[in-house]
Image (tube, rainbow, N blue to C red):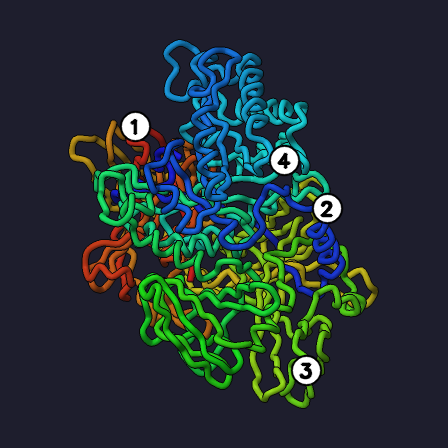
Amino acid sequence: MGSRGGMGGIRPILPMPPIPPIALRLMFRPLFHLALCLAAALSVARAGEPHPSLPPPVIPDCLGVNIHFTDPKPGEMEMLAAAGFKWVRMDFGWQGTERKKGEYDFSAYDRLVATLDKFKIRAVFILDYGNPLYAEPGDVPHFTSRAHTPEFREAFGKWAVAAVQHFKGRGYLWEMWNEPNGGFWKSPDKTGDYIALAKSTGEALRQAGLLGTKGEAFIGPATSTIDLPYLEACFKAGLLDYWDAVSVHPYRQGAPETVEEEYRSVRLLIRKYAPKDKIIPIISGEWGYSDGWNCRTGTSDIDRQFLVNIANDIPLSIWYDWRDDGLDQQNPEHHFGIVQHESVKDDKLPLKPKDAYTAVKVLTEELGGYRFSKRLLVNNENVNEEPNARLLLFTRGATDQKLVLWSTATTDEENRYVFLPASHGLFHVAHRSSFPPLHRVAAGDNGVLVNPISWAVKYFTPEKANDFLRIAAASPRLPLEYAYHWPEFLDWKSDHETRGLLQGVRNPLNRTIILNAGFSSNPGESLEAGGESIARDQVGTGSRTVRMARDRRTIEDWIDTGNGQRLQLSQETTLICTNPLDLELLPPGADSLIVRVLNPSGESATLTVYDYHSEPRVEVPVIFETGQTEKIARLPLKTKFGTPRRVELAIHQKYPQEGVGLEDVFYRDFGKWLPLPALSATNLKAFADGDAKSNATFHFSPAEILSPDTRSVAVRLTYQFSNGWKFIQANATFPPIDPSGLADQWYNGWPSYFAFWLHGDGKGCQVRIRFQDASGQTFQGDGPKIDFTGWRFVKIPMQSTDDRPLAHWGGVNDAKIHYPIKWDSIFLLDNVSRQPVEGEIFLSAPTLIY
């Protein structure tokens, strides 16, 4: 609630720092080593139930919207209910309800609750903000200057108990403050003072008999963005003992789908700290897009946002906001609403709806009464399949199924298709631009080819019983992730004998179906009516990413429904290791590869690191004692320095059985590395740019210290910035980058990262690079803020991703890199604070990574 400026809602001015991605280091491991761990994970998932006030995963019971009123305009609540919303989220302000110490007036909320009851809408009430009765004189705007005092905490707890007691029995959710990690908490210690207040409030509610499964639901902390360090501090302090759900505000200017890894990180933290057998889900308590943001996203992404949340087991999604807050076209805060500002008139409705209102109305009407079944992977070998397609299956009872489809691509691709697996029949297709009329699409022998694929959501409803979709709906859904701890189970033979822990296909039809027939001489498995198959053996490994080390697994089944059709049922899950290992490749030395082996859990391990491309194969032992988290391994390097080299490394450990040898526990392909010429003070050309009213002085000189790789000396940069926006650009005489010279069977020759060693000074300036393509278009890659001291290996992206696109301008300005490219700035130091600052940093060992 309130200003979204802290969520990236300000029109960007280049160069500008992005919100840094949140990364975890997790370990890969073959699936056949996981059976016992999976059993434990499944058993935990089935223990306990969420708090009964949390809505079931049925549409529209799980959808809501933020409001800012206790007395709606005439006809407004009818319009809100007609969109399908079953929840509203609203500030329950302390200041306005306790004007005299110990006297409470909830009459304004009584009026609101009476209106909500009329439309069967429930509330998320935010117990928020301070009270001038318990604050320092002149403390504004949130009166939290004395939040650290016992008097403040006691008074807040008594008020919270009175409020919850007054409205108990309605199944409301009571939320502990709003964005305490952001601008809505003003006491000196944002984290510690908030935790103390949340614990004392939770204890007061518990002592009053208002918490627990038979009491009211208490949730928190409603963080601004998904702030993992803040959340973990709350969890460590024991707040999950009181909270029935964890609420976050996942604001971003990128696509809604980019939230999924952050949700995964929160789920892992909850699993780590939650009381045994207590189910604590994540709530998307506030999240929206502004039509005033200078990007593709806007309020019309409301249906995608809701669907992404539902597919990630978020039981309640609250859209911010119901009404636009104002008319200023330059103020993004005014344009989060799904209806226009109240001063914009509509002849037929109390408020003028935006496209987002239509989008959510289509969603709630098309999927009313349905619940999410599973996400299906789309596969078709004969057409240009859209790699960004999202396909979700929804069910209502045992007979009704519906498919929902969209693409995460930023542009519509006319030549891209998606194959929807489905048995014979016709589909009705609905989407916002054709509402209420429906299109009719005929299914082919094995399904439907959909073209073009669009970011707009489409709903496919079978006209009659669809056997394949019935089978897909009846079969179990893979969990979003499996968490495991290595190496509990290393005997592959015994492990395969327990593979039934992974559930197979279920047959809801009244006839036999065949699974996985047609693979060489395999006759397939007959599955009788009502039967369930054993676990599948055809488990494929998906992509492994560097940013978040994990193992993504695909489970595939080919199904003959008994009428000659052969359709593929595919799902995906992610394997997460709870005691991860990781490898970091450092710049090569003169005669060695230098590898940092990371063991953040601090568990003891006897390991071996080896290089796939050394002849003969080089293996280096690495031994961790309990408590040790990092080791350096040096592998002899035979390749001549200065030539590109593909680097594939693995970690082994000795197998416990005699005569078996070593077992892979980690593997990573680091790509192709090309060391560039060493930096020196004489080959760098530099200048300062930015606001002409601001000043910057700087000097490059030879360093008196060596970089950690001991191969090349560093160059020192001393700098001083005045107030205002200023940055320093430096370039070297590096040759243009032509992909044709470095392409091979594994890599297209396009560099993914520019990397170098950086000795930081902790002053907070940000590192960037710039390069120019063949069309004259300039691209900017953003590195980290230098909020660290000492040496760090820095990688700056040279390719766009969905969650981190490169800034670009000039030339054809189409966001596509037209090779060859040349350097504009191999190093840019930006004073992002706009405050006076001076410091000294060191640079060394520039490298291209492909």
Tell me where residue 225 sits by quadrant: top left
Looking at the image, residue 279 lies above or below residue 303: above
The local crowd at label 3, few if under 14, some if 14 to 19, many if 20 or more residues have their Cα within 10 Å, is: few
- In the structure shown, which secondary structural element does the residue marked by tag 1 occupy? loop
Q: Amino acid at mark 3?
A: Arg
Residue 169 percent location from the top left of the image: 60, 34
Q: Mark number for residue 604?
A: 2
Q: CA distance from mark 4 to mark 1?
A: 39 Å
Do labels 3 and 4 touch, CB within 8 Å?
Answer: no
Q: Earlier in the sequence, mark 2 or mark 1?
A: 2
Tell me which residue sits at (63%, 50%) in the image: 580
Q: Nearer the viewer, mark 3 or mark 4?
A: 3
Q: Amino acid at mark 4?
A: Leu
Q: Mark number for residue 835?
A: 1
Q: CA distance from mark 2 to mark 3?
A: 54 Å
Q: Amino acid at mark 1?
A: Gln
- In the structure shown, which secondary structural element does the residue marked by tag 3 occupy? loop
The one of 663 and 95 positioned closer to us in this rendering:
95
Q: Mark number for residue 511?
A: 3
Q: Amino acid at mark 2?
A: Ser
Q: CA distance from mark 2 to mark 1?
A: 46 Å
Left or right: 374 in relation to 286 = right
Q: Earlier in the sequence, mark 4 or mark 1?
A: 4
